Image: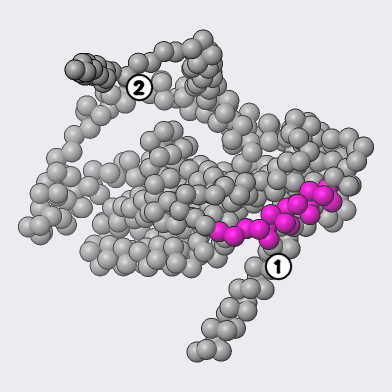
């Protein structure tokens, strides 16, 4: 009679982790890199701001170079013009701004009382009016005095970082060819065309974003100033400047800019408040639906959900600076996915034609840089990449015009 084999021993449900020396070393290196990156965060911030300035002012320098200006003179003219414009703007606005802010502070109690009386006329807003009337500043003044020195030192530190970023951007633009040659020397030549396209697209994204922000903020400031002056609201310049700065932030900028304008208009009565509110909301609608697409064009190409999520992530990680750079960073990540031909899990795109063009560009590049130093090879790679990008833009423009003609014909 055959003996029954004993039942198998139950498997242990515990997960055994046996770290290897190589694994421990990698974890240690990763922690060290993270610690160094945290310590060097201000340096990273300076570098990012400098690259933003290079991307913004670079096209102006290249335009002057195409007009047969020497690069040194072109850089000097562009940076000098920006400096003179900034100083002139400060000279025209800062004295009046200080005067108007002081006037606002002096008349704050009267304006707050008028706003509270106006809100108190309705049962719905009466509680809010009482809260505004009973605001006390004693504790706020005490806490502000305790931290005034800390904030002033942070402001001075920030200004030093900004000045460092400006000088770093100047040096990067002056030594562009040498720095670019050094970067390309560290990258295998089979990836030089790819690297050139990435750098050119990053310059387009950053430069277009900064120039677009400057234009939309200036439009908002001018519109708010003209509106408040026409409505007889005092201290229009200070409020308009704040509205222009607040317009930097998509979606939430409207609440930051409209609030102070309505508070200042409250002294003129409910009719002026209604006019200011309707006019500013109409302008916000015009800006979001017409000005922003015209100014930015296809620079960012981000859905609204991605824009909002990027702002939340950037603001949570780095505060206001993080929110400011969140959109170009998100657009840069999207561009990298496209340029590196990363196949996303939910996509099934036939890019064989694009990859064939990539192969032709790389073959032409290899033929032209045989025996050429890295500095000159970098210039050739950028030239080939620029020609390819211009050809793609022309092709897309022709396709969009054809689509528009077909739609018009169908209508």
Whether residue 82 is visible, yes or no, is no
Q: Residue at x 21, y 18 (%)?
A: 2
- Horizontal relation, residue 389 to residue 16: left or right: right
Residue denoted by label 2: 147
Residue 386 rendering spot, x and y as whole percentages: 75, 54
Front-lying residue, 186 or 321: 186
Question: Marks 2 and 1: which is nearer the front?
Answer: 1
116 in the magenta segment: no
Front-lying residue, 80 or 101: 80
What is the magenta segment's predominant secondary structure? helix
Q: Residue at x 84, y 36 (%)?
A: 375
Residue 336 rendering spot, x and y as whole percentages: 59, 46
Q: CA distance from mark 2 to mark 1?
A: 56 Å
- Horizontal relation, residue 190 to residue 130: left or right: right
Residue 216 rendering spot, x and y as whole percentages: 51, 57
Start-end of magenta stretch: 349-365
Residue denoted by label 1: 394
Q: Residue at x 41, y 25 (%)?
A: 151
- Categorize mark 1 by other alpha carbons within 10 Å: few (<14), some (14-19), many (20+): few
Q: Residue at x 26, y 57 (%)?
A: 266
Kindly identify which numbered label has been placed on residue 255: none
Q: Give yes or no for contact between labels 2 and 1 (Cβ–Cβ under 8 Å).
A: no
The quadrant holding residue 186 is top right
């Amino acid at each position: 009679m055959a003996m029954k084999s004993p039942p198998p021993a139950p498997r242990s449900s515990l997960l055994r982790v046996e770290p290897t020396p190589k694994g421990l070393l990698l974890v240690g290196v990763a922690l060290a890199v993270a610690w160094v990156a945290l310590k060097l965060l201000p340096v990273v911030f300076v570098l990012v701001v400098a690259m933003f300035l290079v991307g913004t002012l670079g096209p102006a320098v290249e335009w002057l170079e195409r007009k047969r200006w020497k690069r040194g003179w072109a850089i000097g003219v562009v940076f000098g013009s920006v400096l003179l414009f900034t100083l002139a703007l400060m000279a025209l606005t800062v004295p009046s701004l200080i005067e108007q802010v002081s006037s606002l502070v002096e008349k704050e109690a009267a304006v707050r009382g008028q706003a509270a009386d106006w809100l108190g006329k309705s049962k719905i807003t009466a509680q809010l009016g009482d809260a505004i009337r009973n605001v006390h500043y004693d504790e706020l003044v005490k806490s502000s005095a305790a931290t005034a020195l800390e904030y002033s030192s942070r402001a001075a530190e920030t200004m030093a970082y900004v000045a460092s970023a400006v000088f770093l951007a100047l040096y990067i633009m002056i030594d562009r060819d040498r720095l670019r040659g050094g970067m390309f020397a560290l990258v295998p030549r089979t990836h030089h065309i790819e690297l050139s396209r990435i750098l050119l697209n990053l310059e387009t994204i950053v430069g277009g974003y900064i120039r677009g922000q400057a234009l939309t903020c200036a439009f908002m400031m001018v519109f708010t100033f003209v509106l408040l002056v026409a409505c007889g609201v005092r201290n229009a310049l200070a409020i308009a400047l704040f509205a222009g700065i607040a317009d930097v932030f998509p979606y939430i900028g409207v609440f930051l800019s409209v609030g102070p304008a309505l508070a200042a208009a409250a002294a003129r009565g409910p009719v002026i408040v209604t006019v200011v509110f309707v006019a500013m909301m109409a302008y916000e609608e015009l800006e979001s639906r017409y000005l922003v697409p015209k100014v930015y064009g296809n620079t960012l190409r981000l859905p609204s959900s991605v824009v909002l999520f990027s702002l939340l992530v950037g603001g949570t990680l780095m505060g206001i600076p993080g929110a400011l750079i969140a959109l170009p960073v998100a657009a840069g990540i999207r561009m990298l996915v496209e340029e590196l031909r990363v196949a996303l899990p939910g996509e099934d795109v036939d890019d064989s034609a694009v990859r064939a063009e990539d192969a032709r560009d790389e073959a032409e590049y290899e033929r032209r840089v045989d025996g050429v130093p890295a500095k000159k090879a970098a210039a050739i790679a950028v030239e080939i990449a620029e020609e390819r990008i211009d050809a793609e833009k022309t092709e897309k423009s022709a396709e969009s015009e054809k689509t528009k003609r077909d739609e018009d014909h169908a209508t």
